[in-house]
């Protein structure tokens, strides 16, 4: 099976370099996931667009990282788990809550727990929530 190279600013296709510089400015580094995405200029530029959309809403950074780490764990994406573990800790998530999410459990914080449970359930049930699941989330 062929693997995607993990690009640096020096090795990336020319059309991906500006997006990688943007990633580096935002994260203080180029995560391996972004380096691999740089193989496709369209993909890495789309990543920046999605990043802006995710961070343009009303969720706090700890809430965003709770959802993204939960998604990464539920989808068993090791690169994303590593990235969102680091970003979650950097955002101020309790290390015990990060460990809980990584183990497939919900954080102890009630609102973060509700977000994590909802994110995991949405993936596992392919978006088909029942009324009780929706009510539990809204109540939290």
Image (spheres, rainbow, N blue to C red):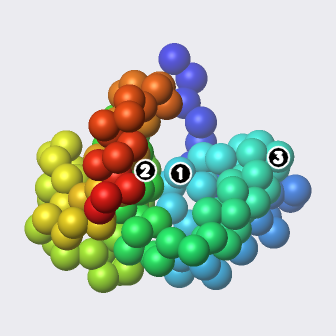
Element at label 3: helix
Left or right: 32 in relation to 46: left
Residue where numbered disc 1 is placed? 33
Q: Count residues near mark 1 (Cα–Cα under 10 Å), then give few for <14, some for 14-19, many for 20+.
A: some
Q: How many marks?
A: 3
Q: Is residue 55 above or below residue 119?
A: below
Q: Looking at the image, can residue 48 be seen?
A: yes
Position in image of residue 31 (x %, y %): 51, 62
Which of the numbered marks, if any, corresponds to residue 121?
none
- The x, y position of residue 61, in whole percent, is 46, 76
**Residue 86 shows up from this direction:** no
How far is the residue under mark 1 from the one under mark 2?
Answer: 7 Å
**Mark 3 nearby-residue class (10 Å; few <14, some 14–19, many ≥20):** few
Marks 1/3 in contact by CB < 8 Å: the verdict is: no
Q: Quadrant location of the C terminus?
A: bottom left
Foreground pick, 10 / 116: 116
Q: Determine contact: label 2, label 3, CB under 8 Å.
A: no
- Mark 2 and mark 3: Cα distance apart in space: 19 Å
Relative to 1, residue 99 above or below: below
Earlier in the chain: of badge 1 and badge 2, it is 1
Quick one: label 1 or label 3, which is nearer the N terminus?
A: 1
> Dot 2 corresponds to which residue?
80
Residue wearing tag 3: 42
Whole-percent x, y for residue 13 in the image = 81, 52
Q: Is residue 60 above or below residue 125?
A: below
């Amino acid at each position: 099976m062929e693997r995607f190279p993990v690009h640096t600013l020096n090795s990336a296709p020319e059309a991906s370099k500006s997006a990688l510089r943007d990633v580096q400015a935002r994260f203080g580094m180029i995560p391996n996931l972004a380096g691999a995405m740089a193989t496709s200029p369209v993909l890495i530029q789309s990543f920046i667009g999605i990043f802006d959309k995710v961070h343009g809403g009303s969720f706090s950074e700890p809430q965003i990282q709770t959802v993204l780490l939960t998604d990464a764990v539920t989808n068993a994406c090791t690169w994303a788990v590593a990235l969102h573990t680091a970003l979650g800790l950097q955002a101020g998530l309790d290390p015990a809550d990060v460990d809980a999410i990584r183990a497939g459990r919900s954080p102890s914080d009630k609102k973060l727990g509700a977000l994590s449970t909802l994110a995991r359930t949405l993936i596992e049930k392919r978006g088909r929530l029942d009324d009780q699941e929706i009510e539990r989330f809204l109540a939290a």
